[in-house]
Image: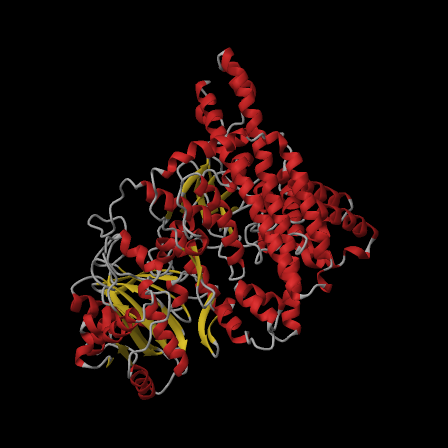
Amino acid sequence: MILWLDDAEASNRSLTGGKGASLAQCRRLGLPVPDGFCVTTEAFLAASRSSAVDGQTNGMHPLPLPPGFESALLDAYGRLGRPAVAVRSSGADEDGRETSLAGQHDTVLGVSGAAALLDAVRTCWASAFNERAAEYRRRREITEAAPIAVVVQRMVDPAVSGVLFTRDPVSGAADAAVVSASYGLGESVVSGHAVPDVFRLSASPPRILSRTMGSKETRMDQGPQGVVTTQVPPAERNRLCLDDDQLLRLLDIGMRLEEYYGCAQDVEWALCDGEVALLQARPVTAFAGRAGSAAPPAGPQSMRARAEELIRADVAEHLPCPYPLDLRAAHRLVEAVAALLSRAGFNPPAPEALLKGDADGVIRLHASLPPQSLWGLTRLPAVVGRSLRHDPMRWRQEEAAVRRRLSRLTRCIDRRAEADSATLLRLLDQAVDAAAHVLHDRYRNYLVPLAVNRAVTMRLAAMAGLGDGVQEEDLYGDLSYATAAANAGISRLAERMRSLGLERRLLQDGPRPFLNGLDATPAGRKLLAELHQFLDDYGARAGSPYLAFSARSWRERPEDLIGLIAVQLRGMNASARERTEIEPPSRPAVMQDVTARLPAPLRGCWHRSVARQRALHVGREGTLYLIEEFFFQARRVMDEIAGRLVAGGVLEEAEDVVLLYDGEMRRALAHPTEVGLTNLVNRRKNARARAREAWLRSCGATDAVESVGSRPADRLALRGFPSAAGRVRGRARVIIEPRDFGRLNAGEVLVCPFTDPSWTPLFSLAAGVVADAGGPLSHAAIIAREYGIPAVLGVNGATARISDGELIEVDGSAGVVTRMSAMAEPSIP
């Protein structure tokens, strides 16, 4: 069940998988492959048979170790010297010429010790059954999973690492190899966490054609507790990480591999003490934009595929990279929406099947729909009809009733310090359940009717001959609703800050120092009183409203609000935006224009439809803010729980509680002396970069993530959904979370993972918007159209592929973002 890479049989794919067989062949060629061994597919098959006998479901339980396997594995590990090792899955169907399964099975880096090695092997085995690999196979019509081998190699400690393509992966040109490189472990390049240096090489004769410097802001290295991410010093960022001699040595290895295999190669490598180590080599399965690509041709999607795509897009926008503690609340929200869908005759996925977390705190979306019954959909008209009969003009009375419930809950939570553990958990559940109840009513009473009403309104506009000239947001310009009121309040605070003479101090000191010194002057105390009043009214607004525990509101982190005010002040001070606009959108007087053009019998219908749509919009925005209020109360309870866990020695820091799953948190609260969570928390901290990548992949961003570094051609044109018309050119400002808001300057293009209502003030300063998630009907699209700036949304991996400060052009009409810096910047000679 163990084969060393130097063994003759190790090059047999059926025994060592695609990765293991390739590495064995590379060692036979005399290439510099780190020493190691393979756990063969025979061990996996024996474990699977034992699992089947025990009645376990594949992937749901760790596979049992076959008799004699543990001693054989540990003997091999001892022969290797018991160093830190890299443990990689090697499927028998991996790394072929037609399909690579790249990234579908698991890799565990920096494994030390016998117990950790056994766990890592089980993790690799289990990845044969994960949803990610299953979805990959389903899309490529691969009927079943092949057996998994596991490669165990001595862990390298590289100064530089990356990827080599022996042919240009975009054009497929045979005489243009591409190298992508950055500092530290290659994981930062392959996963897209660093913007690498990119080199184009010619094999005949061997020479460097061009050099493009990447930002290389972070690096990943092996630390005592696992892989850690650190900042790269500015001096190292501002120089190329490979010299010509190193590049030519890499090229030589690549050409030897291509000659041996007879096809283009995708090679992962590392540079250790000046020497190249070959970590992986596999055939390139497809070239972008080239005839004959192995990628499946685009074609009409099935209804099920479209529905799954809609789920992925919606969840990616509303739950950006949840933490473990967010998972149960997310399940409760999904359950609330699923209840409505079930009544309508749909068969929605179970919340626990839709969102799953693993032992490292990595959460993935599994947007696979169960079979649907056409007979069940006969209930749909009745459910939609009930939704349409709801009167949105009753929103104020409904809001008052919910706020009474909120007030009762708040009074109980105000006494949380006196509560016992059981009471704290009950209050926590009440807050989350209340948020889920509001979400259910939000869909039933406002979102479903709004979708129907919007169709009627737009149909009437089309009958008036305006059609595309009318946008939904044109109907809300003078409307008072939660988000508009909050944004107006921010503008008033900005004006007040200016009138009190505090503007310069804020812009010079920054949000946190400014806040700390506010009570030192009479003007500061006046502003502080008004700030507290605003926070009482709108302070539950959070950067990610559906993340119950990892998000933080303005009340909890007022420096985020002050950062927004700084953005407003800079916008007021900007004499002109630094942008070139083409096709500026017009703002017609919609009501008057449509009324004048419609036949008289339809004018009353138009006015009633618009009035209903405006009322539905008020309820839609108001329900979202109430959800944020309940989650704010849930976090107050959780902060009390976290404080008790710290006091009991269970956690080192209160903020670490978000790295625990709900069940772990409850067990730790009930039995603090029996639970040791320090190692678990540290492991999950180190896995956060991998967690973000895994989340993006599961939300459909696989191609985008892989193209950063591992597909190093860095396509100049990135595509997404055309979401707000117009075209603009400006410097990209990558904003990942609310604490970064203050970095945006007038005339820059906002590049972000998503937006929600708390991001709205940034739109007054931005020249355009590009987002990883979202679409034409999402919040970012609506607000961008309101502000008359172009937006391209759903650009998978935009925040990783676009460098901060890079010159880009955003074409919101075509849905294209062009990286002008990559086109215009000369190569480094």
Q: 240 or 709, which is in the foreground?
A: 709
Q: Is residue 311 above or below residue 708?
A: above
- Residue 219: x and y in percent read 45, 68
Residue 177 shows up from this direction = yes
Q: Is residue 691 above or below residue 381?
A: below
Q: Residue at x 56, y 75 (%)?
A: 675
Where, quadrant-wise, is the N terminus in this rendering?
Answer: bottom left
- Residue 674: x and y in percent read 57, 77
- Residue 752: x and y in percent read 50, 50
Q: 129 or 310, which is in the foreground?
A: 129
266 displayed left or right of 227: left
As drawn, which residue projects farthest toward the top? 600
Q: Residue at x 64, y 65 (%)?
A: 641
Look at the image and name its color scheme.
secondary structure
Where, by quadrant of the figure, is residue 87 drawn? Answer: bottom left
- Residue 368: x and y in percent read 36, 51
Q: 450 or 799, which is in the foreground?
A: 450
Q: 335 or 70, which is in the foreground?
A: 335
Where, quadrant-wise, is the C terminus in this rendering?
Answer: bottom left
Q: How many marks?
A: 0
Q: Residue at x 27, y 43 (%)?
A: 298
Q: Is residue 501 above or below residue 102?
A: above
Residue 736 shows up from this direction = no
